[in-house]
Each structure stands twice: as C-alpha cells, then as structure tokens.
Image: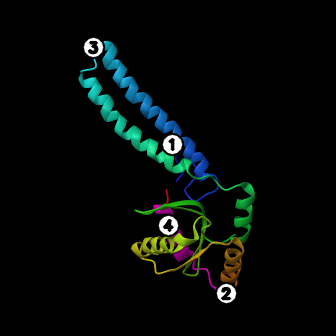
C-alpha cells in the first residue's frame, strides 16, 4: 500500500524513505505540542491552564513518533549494488528486502527474505549467535498465519545464493502459498 508516496514495506529504499517520513512526522508533532503550549501561555498569560495539559497530552504521540524514528535510524537501506545482487538471484521468486523484525528481546535487520516451495530462506548478517532466535520468530509468525514452513537462516551470501539456486532448480514454486508466507512476514516487519 503506497501511502503519501512512501515505498511498500519490503522494497528497496523503504528504510531510507520511512526514516525521513518518521523524522518529519516527529518534528511536526513536537511543533504542534509546543504550539499548543505557547497559545495557552500567550493568550492566558500563565502556564497553569488547560492548554498546558493539552500540550503534555500532545507529547505522547510525538514521543511515539520519535521512537519510530529511532528504530529506523538504527538501520540503513541496501545499496544499489547489494539490491541488484540479491534481485538477480531471487528474480521471479516471492522476496522482500530491508526487513526489520522485532521480538520482545531483540531487533533483527534481515536484508532479504525469500519464500520458495514451503521454505523461507533469509540472509542475516549481523550476529551468528542470534540466528536461532530469528528462525524461531519467523517460524512463529508463519505458524500464527497458518503456514507450515521450514525456515533457514544464512549468515553467508554465497551459501544463501547457492540455496536459492538449488531451491529454484529442485522445488516447485507454490506462488499462492509462497506469496502468503511473504505477506505474513511483511505484516510484522517495521
């Protein structure tokens, strides 16, 4: 869904554009809260008014927007070279890029996730010790959406590309099911 000329989740450039959108939204919301406060201060001549309460309440969504900006500021979009490399290998397969998946314990940045033949293949380059947690999270998301899949996490591009090529050659693409799996993962991504 394109909204205000922003890219879809899971496409190239999403993080960069979303970071800018969140920054603008945060600045506007804080400016509105300050505006409400100063309206009350200048019209009534005191800080002890209902306008101050409204200004404090206006800070709640502004702070929420700030948290959203901070989440996107931690990660960067894929470079053109990385995107071309991943897109070349994953062509004609259901794939999403620039995924930020959050659990109660950790946040994962997964550059590319591909679904083929009931398998979910993800490239996770950050922390090798945490790939089991990412695997469990993706598996739980898919099970909640009603999909029984096998999740494989790769920490090496070469192994990921080899598996993609092997899956394309040996597995049949179940387009409807694979797209539904990708949509389920996209729905929980930031």
Picture coordinates of residue 171 (x, y %)? 63, 85
Q: Is residue 143 left or right of residue 40?
A: right
Cα gap from disc 4 to disc 1, whole angstroms: 22 Å
Question: What residue is shown at x 56% (from left), y 45% (from top)?
Answer: 19
Which is more N-terminal, label 4 or label 2?
2
Residue 2 percent location from the top left of the image: 54, 50
Mark sitting earlier along the chain (1/2): 1
Element under disc 3 = helix
Mark with earlier residue (1, 3): 1
Mark 3 vs mark 2: give the one in front: 3
Q: How far is disc 2 from disc 4 in space, using C-alphas? A: 24 Å
Given the current orientation, which residue lies at the most extreme left position? 49
Residue at point 66%, 56% (across, down): 78
Viewer-side label of 1, 2: 1
Lower sequence index among marks 4 and 1: 1
Distance from the alpha carbon under mark 3 to that under mark 4:
51 Å
Name which residue lies at 52% across and 76% down.
177
Dot 3 crowding, Cα within 10 Å, few <14, some 14–19, many 20+: few
- Foreground pick, 130 / 24: 130
Whichever of callouts 3 and 4 sits on the residue coming sooner in the sequence is 3
User: Of the numbered discs in the image, which one, if any, rests on residue 22?
Assistant: 1
The secondary structure type at the circle numbered 2 is helix
The residue carrying mark 3 is 44
């Amino acid at each position: 869904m394109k909204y205000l000329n922003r890219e879809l989740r899971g496409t190239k450039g999403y993080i960069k554009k979303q970071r800018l959108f969140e920054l603008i939204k945060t600045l506007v919301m804080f400016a509105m809260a300050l505006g409400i406060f100063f309206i009350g201060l200048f019209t009534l001549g005191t800080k002890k008014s209902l306008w101050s309460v409204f200004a404090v309440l206006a800070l709640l969504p502004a702070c929420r927007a700030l948290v959203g900006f901070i989440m996107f500021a931690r990660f960067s979009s894929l470079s053109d070279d990385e995107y071309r490399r991943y897109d070349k290998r994953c062509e004609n397969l259901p794939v999403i890029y620039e995924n930020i998946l959050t659990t109660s314990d950790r946040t994962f940045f997964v550059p590319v996730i591909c679904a083929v033949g009931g398998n979910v293949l993800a490239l996770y380059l950050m922390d090798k010790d945490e790939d089991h947690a990412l695997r469990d999270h993706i598996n739980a998301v898919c099970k909640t959406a009603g999909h029984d899949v096998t999740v494989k996490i790769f920490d090496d591009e070469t192994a990921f590309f080899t598996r993609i090529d092997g899956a394309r050659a040996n597995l049949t693409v179940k387009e409807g099911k694979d797209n539904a799996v990708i949509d389920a993962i996209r729905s929980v991504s930031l």
